Image (cartoon, grey):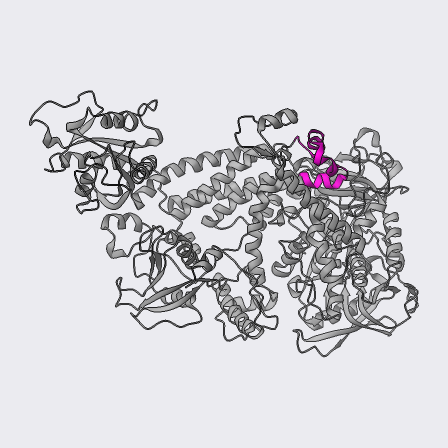
Amino acid sequence: MMIENRGALYQSRRGVGGASCQDWKPPRQRGPRSCTRQGSGAPAPGSGATIFALSSGQGRCGIAVIRTSGPSSGHALRSLTAPRDLPPARSACLRLLSHPRSGEPLDHALVLWFPGPQSFTGEDCAEFHVHGGPAVVSGVLQALETEAQRRQALRQLDGELGHLCHGWAKTLTKALAHVEAYIDFGEDDNLEEGVLEQADSQVRELELALSAHLRDARRGQRLRSGAHVVVAGPPNAGKSSLVNLLSRKPVSIVSPEPGTTRDVLETPVDLAGFPALLSDTAGLREGVGPVEQEGVRRARERLEQADLILAVLDASDLASPSSCNFLDTVVVRPGAGSPRENSQRLLLVLNKSDLLPRGGPDPRPDLPPHLLLSCLTGEGLNGLLEALRKELAEVCGDPSTGPPLLTRVRHQHHLQGCLDALGHYKQTKDLALAAEALRLARGHLGRITGGGGTEEVLDIIFRDFCVGK
Amino acid sequence: MFSLRGCGLCVAASLSKKRLPLARLIGDSAAPVAANFDVVVIGGGHAGTEAAAAAARCGSRTLLLTHRVDTIGQMSCNPSFGGIGKGHLMREVDALDGLCSRICDQSGVHYKVLNRRKGPAVWGLRAQIDRKLYKQNMQKEILNTPLLTVQEGAVEDLILTEPEPEHTGKCRVSGVVLAGGSTVHAESVVLTTGTFLRGVIVIGLETHPAGRLGDQPSIGLAQTLEKLGFVVGRLKTGTPPRIAKESVNFSILNKQTPDNPSIPFSFINETVWIKPEDQLPCYLTHTNPRVDEIVLENLHLNSHIKETTRGPRYCPSIESKVLRFPNRLHQVWLEPEGMDSDLIYPQGLSVTLPAELQEKMITCIKGLEKAKMIQPGYGVQYDYLDPRQITPSLETHLVQRLFFAGQINGTTGYEEAAAQGVIAGINASLRVKRKPPFVVSRTEGYIGVLIDDLTTLGTNEPYRMFTSRAEFRLSLRPDNADSRLTFRGYKEVGCVSQQRYERASWMKSSLEEGISVLKSIEFSSSKWKKLIPEASISIGKSLPLRALDVLKYEEVDMKLLAKAIPEPLKKYIECRELAERLKIEATYESVLFYQQQQINEVQQDEALQLPKDLDYLTLRDVSLSYEVREKLHFSRPETIGAASRIPGVTPAAIINLLRFVKTTQQRQMAMNALPKTDQSLCDTESLEERQL
């Protein structure tokens, strides 16, 4: 139905997911563990596929670097910089990047060409240093995502996931065909009773299957891009020290001054074997200056999005108002009870255990389960890591069991789009609108499985119904 | 043997056996008798009449050539017009000032809009038509069209000359040779020959050439086309028997009454010619197991069914229904053929059994126990020309200034034929004036969907319009065909009358004004609830609701809104059509926004024109596989969008073509310094801001 984006003829090693900004890092930077997970079912490097991704950080930045690696890199570079030829090897050149399809200018960028094997991956590589606004970056990434890539993804969409998607696509196409038949033939020809009801129930079942699957998918997503672990607590509980301890490098400026961290700092870490995005947040407290207030607001926002909260309290200061307030509002949410909403998980850490009397009793036996830690001495760190491993295994899902996990952002995006569209189907009484929702839903699935065009729909109509005159 | 006259599925099938005097000129009496015309249209069926009238409306001196003037406007198959998808086409034909909708408003005997409960985007305007009245009214219209001359005669051959070098094509048509040997010079020729190309009528095991004694000329033309290298295919279709009205026992059957009030087909009509209470009913009956038995026992006597000629995937005949969906009761609609007609048309009973068996089959159906068959059903097999050989303006790739419209392109149905006729007539005229062609995109109308499907995909079954074929169904509605096409027709082509243009302009500005007024009226949901207690507005909503939002509720219409808020809404209910269209716009408002984005995306691809004179087979600068080259060579897509819809043309090929088009365009742009028209995709503005 819609015309697919056709940029450079270009393929991704992990299929369509390669188009995602978070999807790819140069192979050498990737830990072996995650590589195994990512690489399942995909051809080995050097087998002829080409991958690309944003390799600098996400979001607004001065310059963003997009890298490609693989035999089609030269082709991609040429198609984005047409009509100019490849720049000289390993030297930065200013080029106008244009969309290969529309010719629309995307950005003036520095481009570099690294013919293999003298490149960071050993394959042909290209780098695009573009102006880092999200619009430019997504424009260039979209230009790189291609029909050929989509097809590649379709070929790779085998195994259980492929089976599932094709099954859903089939069900949805049939439901769509039946609704279309009801529109085009319902009155003049005798369609069997209950055509619409049958389509309705198929759509309902599909919704259930998709939403269950997407819940799983989110776990897979976390495994790939990292679970969001947020360190939170009242000011000066030692959050930044904990972050520094866990990431083994100074991310946060630590000082005994409360309110030192005024924004959210993020760092990707390997936590107990799981990839995680560790966020340090401003201490939660009221009545401070506007800058810190903003930090507090962001901290609360980040807490909402966290998969796992590391709640840090000063073990020597548990009776203070800020500690009590934190315990009441974050650790034990009023009315929320336990388990926490949204399957969000929480570990309570009492820091500065070195300040407690040695071998003394638990400072607050009435607290929820908690761990004692001293960021200063490192005491209790092993216990914390073990607890983290257990929690993260839950959050990320165990990769070795369970239904196939969706790890491709793009698939997840379209499955979610499909699910949303199915939601609209139910709400509308106008059958043309309802059918439009199904068409939209099928279009989303079509981006994963292909098919679902008019002829396929007509084939089903004429196969299932005796219509025509 | 029953007479087949007057029931042929095509002009040629019922054409005269006599050689008629050549110079019998009828029509625009002021025009000089001449053998020189701008546009010559061959065939007076649904495509031919629309083509001839459209060319004349565009200001071209036009000649309509038909075997017999008294068959002009003949409805040779079903006695109805419109339906779901087909009604959409009729509204678009009307928006371009075509004839069939207006004629139907003067000739119907039972007007009924289908799909009333399914949403206005898929309403199917439909009517049972009085065959005799339709023919009369159509002939009156055609014979009184300025610049249009009608002449009886059979076309034997085309006159071909050297091609114009600036266009593709191996030769150019410059006129036609008539049966008597005389010639008519023409700047453009439109061929609307229906099923006449080697048409064969089949009943049981008997076959008859469709044109019989009069068919010599048609064979000459068919041979010419074949010699020119046109790829020919074969299709089959059929028609049911006709039954004597007085022999049917209607009293035991389900009666269907027409709509009250009747909704006219044409934008320029407020009402139809006949009051609802004077209209005729239709009746519904069903087949039964006995019908199945008769069909199955006699398959050996049914050569139409045995033949390998490809029929459609849908079930056109009772035989295909019985074979593919056994043990079911199939609907048979008993439709009137006209006000004073003695015949009933049993829709759904198309059959090619030997005549005696047809009568036997009919009489075992409820209500038809004593039915008298006046004329048997029969099948027709005919040649069509692969429509991938024509451009979206319906001109052939092979022969310059030769246009095809109607069944010759593999379609079925009056409406499909009429739609092509209008476009062929307009473009035949534009071609003479050396103006760019008038092409309707599939984002603009069902006409565009029809022609794009035919010219890019071809067809191997009689192509019929369904709304499921239209991607942008919510935008291409029967109610808004005028806003999609009338302005284009008026400004680009001149095929639309001043009166229609003014009406469409008034409607457009009233709609725009009405929508902005409806957007400006805002109240809280509780206030709305008080104002319109009938509406199921949930009071919990905190945001204020616009009147346009309230109008989206199924149970709310403009009348209800205007009752609650007389000022300023009162004036929008004075015109029924305006009030209804405001309601429809409100219903689809939110979705149309997104659909428009999709339409823009497609239009970007359509804006990327492929040069017409590309020789894909030898093109050097583009890397294409031989298979792709052949496909492109055959279909000759005009845009990247059309190329991308051709099955088998790979994405890689599209990219290579794109690069080619882009460099060509850049070269042109550098020469003409034209402004770039297709600003596209994402974030253009933000990009421009960021330019170094």
Any part of residue B406 in sight? no
Judge whether B486 appears above or below A196 on screen: below
Say which of B112 and A317 sits in front. Answer: A317
Name of the residue lying farthest toward the front = A289
Judge whether A135 appears above or below B396 on screen: above
Q: Which residues are magenta?
A: B555-583
Residue A436 position in % (x across, y down): 57, 42
Q: Quadrant of the C terminus of chain A?
A: top right
Q: Is residue B643 left or right of residue A52?
A: right
Residue B582 sits inside the magenta stretch: yes
The majority secondary structure of the magenta stretch comes to helix
Say which of A288 and B53 sits in front. Answer: A288
Residue A427 sits inside the magenta stretch: no
* Residue B419, image quadrant: bottom right
Say which of A131 and B340 sits in front. Answer: A131
Residue B358 position in % (x across, y down): 79, 43
Say which of A220 and B692 sits in front. Answer: B692
Residue drawn at x 34%, y 56% as measured from the top left: A62
Judge whether A333 appears above or below B235 on screen: above
